[in-house]
Amino acid sequence: MHPTRKSTLVLLAVAVVLLVLSASGQPDSYWSSGPELIGAIGWFGFMACVLLLIGSGVWALARSIRHRGQPALQ
């Protein structure tokens, strides 16, 4: 599956939501009384999203370099 702009934006939105959830159960945070399991899931999910976003960026960069000298299809 090739990443598209829409899937990359969805992945970015999911990453933001998971980053907010990662505050659950952390001391000195707004949601310090929340369950720590949700915080752990949020943090590791956020890190997975970051890795996928990096991969998506590398794929887009490689595709733009590969298609630089080719005429556009119409």
Image (tube, grey):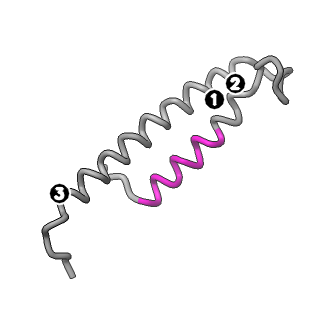
Write down the residue under mark 1.
42
Q: Residues within 10 Å of mark 2 (few under 14, many from 20)?
A: some
Looking at the image, which residue sits at the far bottom?
74
Write down the residue under mark 2.
38
Write down the residue under mark 3.
66
Mark 1 vs mark 3: which is more N-terminal?
1
| Quarter of the image with the C terminus in it | bottom left
Label 1, label 2: how many angstroms apart (C-alpha)?
A: 6 Å
Image marks 1 and 2: residues in contact by CB distance under 8 Å = yes
Amino acid type of the residue that numbered disc 1 sits on in the rendered structure: Gly
Label 3, label 2: how many angstroms apart (C-alpha)?
A: 41 Å
Residue drawn 43% across the image and 34% down it:
51
Q: Residues within 10 Å of mark 3 (few under 14, many from 20)?
A: few
**Image location (x, y in percent) of residue 48:** 48, 31
Q: Is residue 54 left or right of residue 16?
A: left
**Image location (x, y in percent) of residue 57:** 37, 48
In the rendered image, the vertical position of residue 57 relative to residue 33, given as above or below: below
Label 1, label 3: how many angstroms apart (C-alpha)?
A: 36 Å
Amino acid type of the residue that numbered disc 3 sits on in the rendered structure: Arg
In the rendered image, the vertical position of residue 30 relative to residue 70, given as above or below: above
Q: Is residue 43 magenta?
A: no
Q: Which label sits in the foreground, 3 or 2?
A: 3
Residue drawn 61% across the image and 26% down it:
43
Residue drawn 44% across the image and 43% down it:
53
Looking at the image, which residue sits at the far left?
70
Amino acid type of the residue that numbered disc 2 sits on in the rendered structure: Ile
Q: Which label sits in the foreground, 1 or 3?
A: 3
Residue drawn 73% across the image and 17% down it:
36
Say which element carries label 1: helix
Q: Which residues are magenta?
A: 5-17
